Amino acid sequence: MRREDLTEKILDIKRAKGWTWKHITTEIGGVSPVLVVGALLGQMKLVKPLAKKAAELFELPETEERMLNEVPYRGMPMPPTDPLLYRFYELVMVNGPAWKALIEEEFGDGIMSAIDFDMDLERKPHAKGDRIRLTMSGKFLPYKYYGNEQGIAETGVRED
């Protein structure tokens, strides 16, 4: 079985049982719902205790439980064709240069980690239509300036 096949099997079971992602993530627990759903969709791995809970919930055999614990090949072809995913891509294309400039001014020369990272999603009622609020928090990782001489900064942290 390939990982894509396991994802389809999980989605088939979800549909057949009429489960919501909220139900599934509450049953599995342990980490952010974004990570659990990401793992069940094949983009993340579940640690062994959570892979076991997911396998029990979905009545998966041991080999598929182990597959949920494997590091996946992540990502997708760009740009994405799904309209919702494309809007995220568009947000980065349009706002990315401003985000980069503001982050560098505040933190220095580096990146925001997508590994040491938290994300929350919530529904925010609004008179003109409910809003989606995403909160992302990633560790700042300054670039290392290798080969630096004495007195020259080793990393790209902001210079005051």
Image (spheres, rainbow, N blue to C red):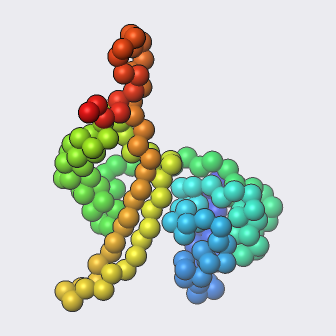
Q: Nearer the viewer, residue 64 or 160?
A: 160
What residue is at 36 percent from the left and 67 percent from the top?
A: 134
Residue 88 vertical placement versus 116 (above, below): below
Determine the residue located farthest toward the top in the rendered image: 149
* Any part of residue 69 in sight: yes
Q: Is residue 160 above or below residue 138?
A: above
Q: Quadrant of residue 88?
A: bottom left
Q: Quadrant of residue 65?
A: bottom right
Q: Farthest residue toward the bottom?
A: 127
**The residue positioned farthest toward the right in the image shown:** 62
For image coordinates 55% across by 66% down, the residue present is: 32
Quarter placement of the C terminus: top left
Residue located 58% across and 87% down the image: 18
Against 107, residue 143 (above or below) is above
Query: Residue 136: where, in percent of width, then height?
Result: 39, 59
Q: Position of residue 133 (x, y in %)?
A: 34, 72
Say whether residue 93 is visible: no
Find residue 142 and report its horizontal and vertical position in percent. 39, 34
Residue 150 falls left or right of residue 49? left
Nearest the viewer among 22 and 104 is: 104
In the image, taking residue 152 as reference, residue 104 lies left or right, namely left
Residue appearing at x 51%, y 49% in the figure:
116
Location of the N terminus by quadrant is: bottom right
Q: Quadrant of residue 67?
A: bottom right
119 or 60: which is nearer to us? 119
**Image check: 111 left or right of 74?**
left
Q: Is residue 151 left or right of residue 37?
A: left
Image coordinates of residue 125 in percent, x first then y, are 30, 86
